Amino acid sequence: MMFLFTSCENYEIVDHGELTAINEKSAQINGINYCTENGTTDFILGNKITVDKEPAYIYMKDENFYVSKAVQDDINALESKRTTNVNSALVLQGIFLLLGIMVLIPAHVNKREDNLKTVKIIGAAACGLAFIPGTYLFLGKCFPEALSDLNFTQQHIEFMDYGELTKIQSKTKTINSNAWSISSDKAINTQEKLARFKKYSVISIDGKKELFEGRNPKVLRAEIHYINQKDYSTQEVIIALLSLIGFSGGLYFLTIDKKKRIRSRSSGIVSEDEKNGHSVEE
């Protein structure tokens, strides 16, 4: 599951600079014409690329060139929290469901009376744990103001400011004479220690302020817009289905033997005349 929803594209940036020309078959950067495969559609952002003296990047993937005005590593850094949360939920659900199935099915088949009850409780609990991520999502979506943190597939990023970092304090950082409440001493995209007189962007991720090093503000705004528009509904549906499977599986295995015992007792009641409560006329 983690491999399914984690971006694992094998690509690299081979050149970057001002985009001076582009058509359906090539893009020109730094005076070099690259024969690109994505035409005038941005390789990463998916929108139409225009020549506006803004920087662009040439990617190589599977021995082909592609052009984009975004940096994939920036996007990965900005949405790492959401991607990690989604992948972790899917992986944990898979582990708990597998554990529950491995415990419950053999116990149900073998019916070892000495430890059957304990084994089934353990297996059902494992299945029940797979239900938790779906519950979080449901509550987070039903109560977006009070429980927004539980909706771990939702993330909002906002561009706040751009300029030179002039003052660094333990809990505040000053850019363009504006003091921002930022406790981290590293840039979110490079993980390098902050340095005075370098240029940073101030961004807000779900309300928490961070510094982003050295990216053109227009490029960063486009990347943020792309991330905010990304749809995680497919992953949410899968998480909900796995949660439902876990809950239903655990409940089924906990109650199935109780139902059988009730039916067995009902059908096995025999009266003193061994007529199962029915009279026989002679």
Image: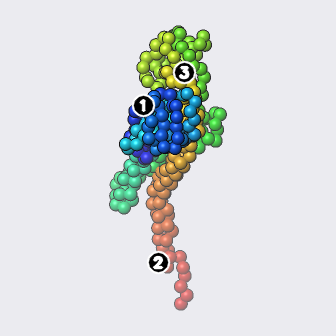
**Residue at 53% in and 24% down:** 216
Mark 2 falls on what kind of element? loop
Q: Secondary structure at mark 1?
A: strand
Q: CA distance from mark 3 to mark 1?
A: 23 Å
Q: Residue at x 64, y 38 (%)?
A: 143
Task: Tell me where residue 206 appears, x and y as whole percent.
Answer: 58, 29
Residue 245 visible to the viewer: yes
Which of the two residues, 36 or 249, is positioned nearer the viewer here?
A: 36
Real-space CA distance between mark 3 and mark 2, rounded to the nearest whole angstrom: 87 Å
User: Dot 2: few (<14), some (14–19), or many (≥20) neighbours within 10 Å?
Assistant: few
Query: In the image, is residue 99 above or below residue 111?
Result: above
Query: Mark 2: which amino acid?
Result: Glu
- Identity, as a three-letter code, of the amino acid under mark 3: Ser
The type of residue carrying mark 1 is: Asp
Residue 20: horizontal and vertical position, in percent?
Answer: 52, 31
Which mark, residue 201? 3
Instruction: Give me the residue at 45% from left, 60% from top.
Output: 257
The quarter of the picture where residue 174 lies is top right
Q: In the displayed structure, does residue 102 sit left or right of residue 208?
A: left
Task: Give neighbour class at mark 3: few <14, some 14-19, many 20+ (Cα, 10 Å).
Answer: many
Residue 255 x %, y %: 48, 57
Q: Earlier in the sequence, mark 3 or mark 1?
A: 1
Q: Which residue appears at 41% of the width and 33% of the height?
A: 13
**Crowd band around label 1 with a 10 angstrom C-alpha radius: few (<14), some (14–19), many (20+):** some
Q: Which residue carries the number 2 mark?
A: 274
Q: Is residue 273 above or below residue 120?
A: below
The reply to whether dot 3 and dot 2 touch (C-beta < 8 Å) is no
Q: Which residue is labeled 1 in the image? A: 15
Q: Residue 123 or 242: which is nearer the viewer?
A: 242
